[in-house]
Amino acid sequence: DVVMTQSPLLLPVTLGQPASISCRSSQSLVRSDGITYLTWLLQRPGQSPRRLIYQVSQRDSGVPDRFIGSGSGTDFTLKISRVEGEDIGVYYCMQGVERPHTFGQGTKLEI
Amino acid sequence: EVQLVESGGGLVQSGGSLRLSCEASGIIFSNYWMNWVRQAPGKGLEWVANMNQHGGDQYYVDSVKGRFTISRDNAKNSLYLQMNNLRAEDTAIYYCSTLAVGDSGDYWGQGTLVTVSS
């Protein structure tokens, strides 16, 4: 199985300041179609997860442009240019290149 | 508005069975791969199983193979998870999701709690 490793697991942040989360996979997430299947999700306290970014850098509808996904191969990053209060929660990366789909451990963003 | 509504969770003894259901509205259900994802109390997300649009392909995480069965009824816009021989480590919130990896919509239900007592 593909192992997804996130760091840090706890990220204290200051409102208005940038934040960055790293995600590494144990093997390349590039599928035979040439697309990299790396997804970022946010789970706010008490809520279901919500996808923010798919295929490394594509933002979902309604996701603010302060969320920026980047990376390639096995190394990926989610950056928040200026943290806002609604960004608090646990962020997960997930690989969709093969089954079982696997998630990182989660990074808790807190003020 | 898209809604995925799970039901069927509850308290069951180790070795028992439960059947979870997920009813979708607001989407063309038959267009989507559908997934079950679970989250143990205070823990992260774990993908459990998925099924293709017409039910011909299904996949499972190793820990549930032979015990859980995913199925769907496109006429009823519904997804199911039959869980047999339940173990304490199956205790979790179970989410129904499209878990889209491409540019199709990604939708999640509110989850249903399964508690397995030993």
Image (cartoon, grey):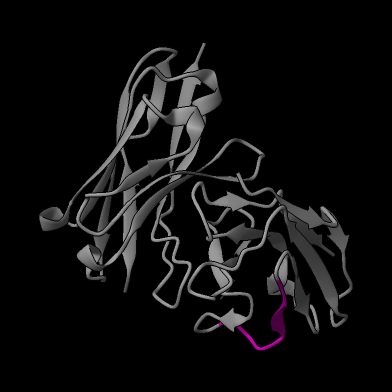
Residue A11, by quadrant, is bottom right
Residue A65 colored in magenta in the image: yes
Residue that extends furthest to the left in the rendered view of this protein: B75
At horizontal 38% and vertical 17% (from top left) the residue drawn is B85
A43 left or right, relative to B26: right
At horizontal 59% and vertical 59% (from top left) the residue drawn is A95
Question: B37 or A71: nearer the eye?
Answer: A71
At horizontal 58% and vertical 72% (from top left) the residue drawn is A36
Residue B77 colored in magenta in the image: no
Residue B33, by quadrant, is bottom left
Q: Where in the figure is residue B74, as x and y percent of width and height?
A: 15, 56
Query: Quick one: quadrant of the N terminus of chain B?
Result: bottom left
Q: Where in the figure is residue A104, as x and y percent of width and height?
A: 68, 52
Q: Where in the figure is residue B90, as x and y percent of width and height?
A: 50, 27
Is the residue B54 above or below the residue A19 in the image?
above
The segment highlighted magenta reads A63-72
Residue that extends furthest to the bottom in the rendered view of this protein: A65
Is the residue A104 above or below the residue B82 in the image?
below
Is the residue A83 above or below the residue A93 in the image?
below
Residue that extends furthest to the front in the rendered view of this protein: A32
Question: B99 or A49: nearer the eye?
Answer: B99
At horizontal 53% and vertical 67% (from top left) the residue drawn is A31
- Principal secondary structure, stretch drawn in magenta: strand
Residue A68, by quadrant, is bottom right
Question: B115 or B77: nearer the eye?
Answer: B77
Q: How many callouts does the rendering have?
A: 0
Is the residue B82 above or below the residue A102 in the image?
above
B74 left or right, relative to A37: left
Q: Where in the figure is residue A29, as x and y percent of width and height?
A: 62, 64
Question: B30 or B25: nearer the eye?
Answer: B30
